[in-house]
Image: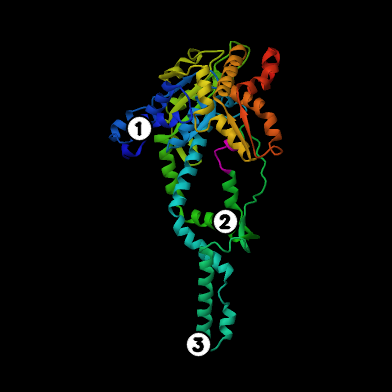
Amino acid sequence: MLLNNVLTPRQIVEELDKYIIGQEEAKKAVAIALRNRARRQILPVEMRDEVAPKNIIMIGPTGVGKTEIARRLARMADAPFLKVEASKYTEVGYVGRDVESMIRDLTELSVSMVRSDQSEAVREKAGEIVENRLLDILVPPPSRRRQRKTSSPNSHLEEFESYERTREKVRKKLKQQKMEDKLIGIEVQSNIIPMVEVFSPMGFEEMDLNFRDMFGSMFPKKTKKRSVTVAEARQIFMEEESDKLVDMDKVVSEAVYKVENSGIIFLDEIDKIVGSDSKTGPDVSREGVQRDILPIVEGSTVPTKYGMVRTDHILFIAAGAFHASKPSDLIPELQGRFPIRVELRSLSKEDFQRILVEPKNALVKQYVALLETEGLKIDFTQDAVTEIASLAFMINEQGENIGARRLHTIMERLLGEISFKAPEIKNQTININAKYVKNQLADIIEDRNLSKYIL
């Protein structure tokens, strides 16, 4: 693996800048962590095993970009990446999902990634086989019975040449996709397996035994006749042939290696598993979960249906608002496993202005594009953007601070009437200025109690 093929920390930050405003410290931290994954891969084997990932914990109020950083990082990382909510897990032995399921999910995701890559690699070969299967249906070869009746060798040769000519004509049409809508009958495998009720304290998806695969192999595979278009048949055959050509043992081996050496888990809402002050009963979804997460973050071996997976070199990035608690309220052992702490700041009025117009997926751009589909042109002036940002900042200050998510509620309220009437007022240009913004939202902003519920 060469570092030249991996994004540099600066390039990662630049990519994140296209979608997330501010939070430079957090961007740099995840960029360095991602680059370190690649650096570790080219170390000598003895040293490689000793280099542990430097896990990160991001601290900051809601709506400032913690989850968005994770989403964008997932698209950039050419590695298995899983985002999970810490609050959905419970302590082992209680009803709910245990924390080991996150490793099983990550492994499943990695297998899907590698299988997809391998399928792409054999796509050309599979395409040729699929084409021949389609030709066999569209131009069936002469039946043996007819061949027996034809006593003359010459007539048999003529019939064969005629069949080949017809087949080549149809092949040409298939390549030019001129027969995509033609209906044909194909045999497909029926995926229905017997219903089995399992009584277990764990969810069905949590059980290590893959019952679906087990029962699928026990019972004979049934086929059923389906009438589909050539385009649909091509897709069905492509999946079947790709599965036959892909070596699943190799896929699983590579997938497990990727999880163990370059897997990343984003653990959101980690502040929700901080233990409560109440000592009345077992805290099965808080401190108990922290104790269960600890060995996985430290490094342990988790059983999955694809074999044992080691977690020693999986990178964990945790995030939480920590409104009612602080990182030091986590159990000390878990705190020590997240050596890098990054604080994300609250958004300012200037940040809101930039969020509205600068990112690739900026809200103003989204609404303009949506209403343009109705033939309606929306023009936001600079003073309108400033006014929207000021209102969002003010409401966040006066009430609950929900960060950039406040812009969504304001924009929906601002453009609700236009969106409703858009099909009736098409082919027009509407200018949104500061005056329009004030008029649309004046009543709600003046009544502070009402703004708490609506904005």
Q: Is residue 150 above or below residue 65?
A: below
Give the mark nearest the N terminus, 2 or 1: 1
- Which percent across, then down, holds residue 134? 55, 64
Left or right, 422 with respect to 123, comes to right
Callout 3: SS: helix
Dot 2 amino acid type: Ile
Give the mark nearest the N terminus, 2 or 3: 3
Dot 3 amino acid type: Asn
The residue positioned 57% from the left and 72% from the top of the image is 140
Q: What crowding class fits label 3: few (fewer than 14 Cα within 10 Å), some (14-19), or many (20 or more)?
A: few
Magenta-drawn segment: 204-210
Callout 2: SS: helix
Residue 229 appears in the rendering: yes
> How far is the residue under mark 1 from the one under mark 3?
70 Å
Dot 1 amino acid type: Thr
Task: Specify the label residue 427 is tagged with.
Answer: none
- Which percent across, then down, holds residue 109? 50, 39
Q: What crowding class fits label 2: few (fewer than 14 Cα within 10 Å), some (14-19), or many (20 or more)?
A: some
Location of the N terminus by quadrant is: top left
Residue 291 appears in the rendering: no
- Which percent across, then down, holds residue 231? 58, 58
The foreground one among 330 and 132 is: 132
